[in-house]
Image: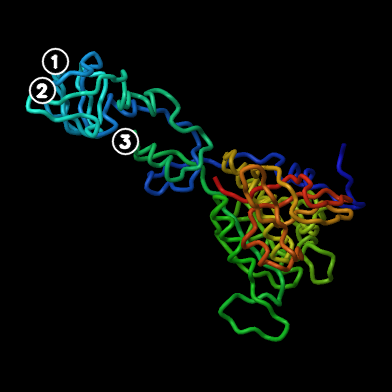
Amino acid sequence: MAEPVANGLQSVEAALAALLDGVEALPDEPVAIERAGGRVLSQAVIARQDVPPADNSAMDGYALRCCDAGRTLPITQRVVAGVPPLPLASNSCARIFTGSEIPPGADCVVMQEDVQETAEGIHFPKTLTLGSNIRSRGRDVASGAVLLKAGTRLEAASLGHLAGQGITEVNVRCRPRVALLFTGDEIVDPGKPLAPGQIYNSNRPMLRRLLERFGAEVIMAEPIPDRYEATCDRLRQAAGKADVVITTGGVSVGEEDHVKQALEALGTLDLWRLAMRPGKPLALGRLPREDGHGQARFVGLPGNPVSSYVGAWLFVRPLMGHLLGCPSLQSLPRMYARAGFATRTQGRRHYMRVRLDFTPDKITAHAFADQNSAVLSSCIDADALAIVPPFTEVSEGDSLECLWLVEK
């Protein structure tokens, strides 16, 4: 059953569809793996060799044949990592160390704590297991297999995976170039004195950090004077440089809100005003480039910091994921939790900031007491956004769908 939408407002699903319509992944570029952290692979990487490249010992001990269980055997060689071993002589064992290659003929390793040293040699337990304490060739990676899929975001483990193959360079998607524009003559950057009626710009560092987490490159972050002509000029400049233009404020219905009007004059307003809370005054559209080469996507976030924060997770993150061809960024992980609070909604879907409490038998979502869109402190410890449909009464213990605010 479709969720009811208030008159004149658009659904979040319609907004996402409009935002992502026609979005294609950006071109790629070669990057050294030392500088590839956080970047997204544009094509699959195929393994060049087996990992490990040969059977090796998982611990310090002795390599021997299982059929020699219970016997006392002389040591005929000492095997260290990095030096190829000799075939294991009959009726003997080899002293071996962690990571060292298994001598041909040996089929198990016994840890040094489980043997007895005697004058005749090493005495082994009566029961041995074939293959014990041996890391077999190709156990981690087989040559010719897909090492990493296209769309993988390169973090610590995947970078180590690449280095383990001797790979020094990979092809990754170009970072989406983002222009951040902030409306409101009352907004002042930190470090400057405040005049009466002015406030500091909390959106600038907050959104810059979120965009970095989402894989983007912020190429400009500037204020827009509260004048229509100045707004048009800044939007033209930004569209000429960026793949995505993001504004905060200026998309409501006030006399000094010029962004929506400028967007309609310069480009296309795809969608405006959403049936969600926080974040109703959100605008989506496109700005043509003056050189005629394509369009920049436009996201007009509300000016209230919580609304900008929530809007960035719901709309900007999936947009970056599609531009990067990165599935893990295209949608937030969803889970169900029991409500640790009670609330009632009216005609808009609520995205409530919640802290998740994990116990062995359940997950409980605890809502922050003040859900006002100006209370940014509620976002600091929020683990998730609990989705509450419109015209819904929630009681403690009810099941709620939650969007987990995590990065993979």
Q: Residue at x 20, y 16 (%)?
A: 68
- Label 2 to label 1, Cα distance in Å? 8 Å
Label 3 vs label 2: CA separation? 38 Å
* Residue positioned 83% across, 48% down in the render: 389
Of 212 and 83, the residue lying toward us: 83
Q: Regarding mark 3 in the picture, which secondary structure is present there?
A: loop
x and y percentages locating residue 341 in the rendered image: 77, 56
Q: Is residue 251 left or right of residue 117?
A: right
Asked which secondary structure carries label 2, the reply is loop
Quickly name the residue at label 1: 91
Structural crowding at the residue carrying mark 2, measured as other residues with C-alpha within 10 Å and reported as few (<14), some (14–19) or many (≥20): some
Q: Residue furthest right?
A: 7
Q: Helix, strand, or loop for circle 1? A: loop
Locate residue 173 relative to residue 82 in the image: left or right.
Answer: right
With respect to residue 172, does 77 lie above or below?
Answer: above
Q: Quadrant of the C terminus?
A: top right
Decide: few, some or many residues near mark 1? Use Cα within 10 Å; few <14, some 14-19, many ≥20.
some
Residue closest to the far left: 119
Asked if one can make out residue 337 in the rendered structure from this viewpoint, the answer is: yes
Q: Mark 1 and mark 2 in contact (Cβ < 8 Å)?
A: yes
Q: Residues within 10 Å of mark 3 (few under 14, many from 20)?
A: few
For the residue pair 341 and 162, the one nearer the viewer reads as 341
Report the amino acid beneath label 1: Asn
Mark 2 residue type: Pro
- Place of residue 190 in the rendered image (x, y in percent of width and height, measured from the top left): 58, 76
**Residue 290 visible in the current orientation:** no
How far across and how far down the image is residue 8, in percent?
90, 52
Disc on res. 166: 3
| Rendered view: 166 above or below 341 | above
Say which label, 3 or 2, has the lower sequence index. Answer: 2
The dot on residue 74 is 2
